Amino acid sequence: MSDRAALLVLTALSTALLSCGAKTGLLVDASVDVVRVDRPDAPTVDVCTPQVVDATPSSVELLLLADRSTSMERDLLGGSGSPRRWDVLRDALAATLPRYQDRIAMGLQFFPGIGGTGICAVGATPDLNPGLSQALPVLMRFSRTEPNGRTPTWLGVQSAGRYLLGRAAPRRFRAILLATDGAPNCNGALDGARCTCTALGGTGQQQCEDDPSLCLDDGRTVSEVARLAAQGVPTYVVGIDGDNQPELITVLSQLAVAGGRPNPATATRPYYSVRRPADLLSAFDQIQRQVSRCVFGVPSAVPPSATVSVTLAGAALARDPDRQNGWDWTDAERTTLTLFGAACDRASSGATSVRLRLGCDPAR
């Protein structure tokens, strides 16, 4: 090869390397100078440069979707004793929200809605828009509100999702925290003679025959939660399941799986199960710790063709699509990743240096 030909090849390689970095907007690891040329005799040169990217903690919006149906007047075991489920929920929030309010933009939406909107109605916007330092406003709204009405979970999830998806918040992790006793209803289109009836009282199924909106509205509620998760808004499910009704436990489990954030500690009841006040405290603490310390963003979208390896404080992490222990992409654009299980525990303990090495797909 002549000197002139060699110079032309080197110029082409340099130009390709510069354009590669410019297209991705990611950091190039200066210690890596490997260049892959698939066809040296081809008129164009295919260049692949490994890159190193530092991920940073994502800003977080968490919208608490709180069940205020009449059943929240009951105690945790389903009786008429005290404390009421409503009071346990408020007290758990009082104990946990202040610890995370500087890192999580917290919002609140009740279902059914407040202000005389009807026993099956939900407000079109949150009762409190997400924002930092909002522990006191959240708790004040709880203190001014009492349980009343039915359980329009489908409408509540739909309204919360519409609000979160409608906000222009790039590079921000958005999620719903659903706290409920697991008996969605308010769907008058169901067959009251054949449905699972959520009505309490001596007449049982007859109540649903007379009023189908008391039927268990599980199908469309689970579908709506799954739809939002597919669009990048997952749902964490905290379920008060002291009634021990199999149908309600099934619905809570289905909602947790559909929401994409099941409780990693258990497979039998994949939601955050609450039977004692301490369970609710633990559930809120786990969820808020995960969203505040275990969600990370990268400066630009990672192409699907890139190979990706992730380290946490220098130690390699495995990608885990089951989201039990390791990392996984948690948005369709591949700009946000979340740590799960022991990896999240390590991040919560202070190991917050997350780094990605992007390589070349050997098949290309």
Image (tube, grey):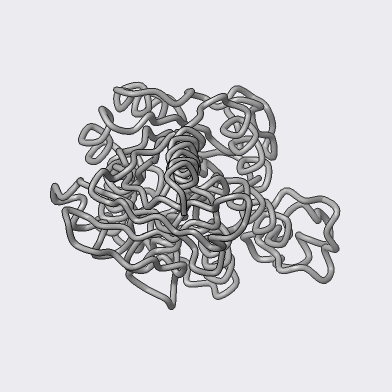
At horizontal 58% and vertical 51% (from top left) the residue drawn is 229
Q: Nearer the viewer, residue 305 or 138?
A: 305
Q: Give how far across and how far down residue 118 sits, in percent.
A: 69, 32
At horizontal 47% and vertical 72% (from top left) the residue drawn is 244
Q: Residue furthest front?
A: 2
Q: Give how far across and how far down residue 70 sits, in percent.
A: 55, 46
User: Is 203 left, or right, of 148 in this rendering?
Assistant: right
User: Is 35 left, or right, of 158 in this rendering?
Assistant: left
Can residue 78 be seen at all in this image of the molecule? Answer: no
Q: Residue furthest left?
A: 350
Q: Nearer the viewer, residue 250 or 241?
A: 250
Q: Give how far across and how far down residue 125 sits, in percent.
A: 61, 25
Q: Nearer the viewer, residue 275 or 165?
A: 165
- Quadrant containing the C terminus is bottom right
User: Is 323 left, or right, of 65 in this rendering?
Assistant: left
Q: Give how far across and how far down residue 63 sits, in percent.
A: 47, 36
Q: How many marks?
A: 0
